[in-house]
Amino acid sequence: MSEVSQGHQRTFEELSRELEEIVARLERGDVGVDEAIALFKRGEELHKACAERLDAAELRLEELSTADQARRA
Amino acid sequence: MKIAPILYGERKVYTVSAFNRGVARFLTRLPSVWVEGEVTELRRNEAWATVFLTLKDPRTGACLKVTIPRHSFDALELDLEEGETVHVEGRAELYEARGELGLRATTIERLGLGAHLLALEHLKRKLAAEGLFAPERKGTLPRVPRAVGILTGADAAARGDLVATLGRRFPAAKIVVCETRVQGRGAPAAIISALHRLAAHQEVDVLIVARGGGSFEDLLPFSNEAVVRAVAACPVPVVSAVGHEQDTPLVDLVADARAATPTAAAALVVPDAQELRAGLDASRRRLQLAVHGVAGRERERVGRLGQRLESAPRQLLERRRGAVDHLGARLQSLSPHATLARGYAVVRARGGALREAGRVAPGDPLEIELASGGLTATVDEVCA
């Protein structure tokens, strides 16, 4: 994740925006094969990171609502 | 008899007796008149043929000596007292021995009810014309006075009723009582002085002038012009509780409020503590209900917000996940590996992808990337 986080913890929005830019560049097709491969590799990392962030958020949300229900009970 | 002067040459000179005689004769030409005044210095002696008294103008203090034959005076059976207002009929007369002017009376009448009523009606019209009884002049009574001033005679009943009612309705009320003379001579001055003393009291916010029932004459001081004017000028609101319902002394008209009885007057000047308390209780109940209503509405609103709060992040996450999945699918469709899987290969020479054959020479090493694994090769021939 060090390549994705780039020194500081980037937000989900920053990560997904970068992913979107990469996909758009690849779709335009004005990149060389090597760059395309590099972009693709980065895109896959970003996609994984985004999916992990969403998983973590969902999990946290679940914890919170469970704790809340426990408190109310 | 002729009054003859003594001649000193050209000058005519009269003796004192002759002068007095002359004036006395001149005065007999004046008509018989009625004179009104207050009786003072009444002197009657069995040994004297004449009764002496002095009539005084209560407004200015001007005095007039009056004489009346004792038999005439006794026949009137007036039983006069000092300070009473009377009408005297007679003629101007000079007491020659002393050169004093007087009134030789033929009859004396105690000022009758009719005359009093007439004078009262006259005064009432005069004060009304001045606007003293106008409703817009009347002040409002304080809702809760710091202290209630009571002006009363040595009238135990009125005072007792007042104090009892004030205490029952509003136990916290302070009461300042000023007892004063309320009838007879000197009563107006005493009432005015008491009024001033009560009005000057630091805490007295309202005044009650109380006087039980009495005869028409007994209540006259409460129609006295100076008393009425003093009440009009009083800086503190005044409630009049004078006489009975049917009596209307002028002080009733000029006072800020009129009460038929002392009890009614007490009810006018202080609130009923029990009613106040009941009003407060009702207000508190309404306040509680209102607060509960507000709290209930707020609870519902917060509940709805809670529901939205719970569902909102999930919806947001779902939308994000949809977007990310979509991007992932787009990314996969662009994968270089998919091209390789169709049988294409990437040929690299000198660290870069090779696009033109002329870039290499026979014997140069090549790296070939396939869908699965890679090869190294050497250039045999270049076909340009």
Image (cartoon, coloured by chain):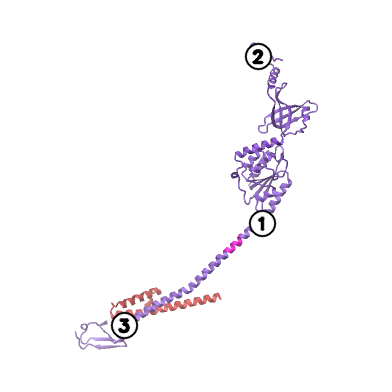
Tell me residue B170's x, y (percent): 67, 53
Residue lying farthest right?
B46
Identify the residue position indicated by label 1 in the image.
B274
Instruction: Mark 3: give few (<14), some (14-19) or many (20+) Cα within 10 Å.
Output: many
Instruction: Mark 1: give few (<14), some (14-19) or many (20+) Cα within 10 Å.
Output: few
Judging from the image, what secondary structure is the residue with disc 1 in?
helix
Q: Mark 2 and mark 3, same subunit?
A: yes
Q: Are marks 2 and 1 in contact (CB under 8 Å)?
A: no
N-terminal of the two: label 3 or label 1?
A: 1
Mark 2 vs mark 1, CA separation in Å: 92 Å
Q: Residue at x 62, y 60 (%)?
A: B282
Judging from the image, what secondary structure is the residue with disc 2 in?
strand
Judging from the image, what secondary structure is the residue with disc 3 in?
helix
Q: Which chain: purple?
A: B
The amino acid type found where label 3 is placed reads Pro
In the figure, residue B290 lies in which quadrant? bottom right
Q: Residue at x 46, y 78 (%)?
A: A59
Screen quadrant of the C terminus of chain B? bottom left
Residue B306 visible in rendering: yes
N-terminal of the two: label 2 or label 1?
A: 2
The disc at residue B12 is: 2
Tell which of B75 and B328 is nearer to you.
B75
Mark 2 vs mark 3, CA separation in Å: 164 Å
In the figure, residue B256 lies in which quadrant? top right
Tell which of B172 and B273 is nearer to you.
B273
The colour assigned to chain A within the rendered structure: red
Q: Are marks 2 and 3 in contact (CB under 8 Å)?
A: no
Image: magenta residue range: B283-290
Query: In the image, which is nearer the foreground, mark 3 or mark 1?
Result: 1
The amino acid type found where label 2 is placed reads Lys
Identify the residue position indicated by label 3 in the image.
B336
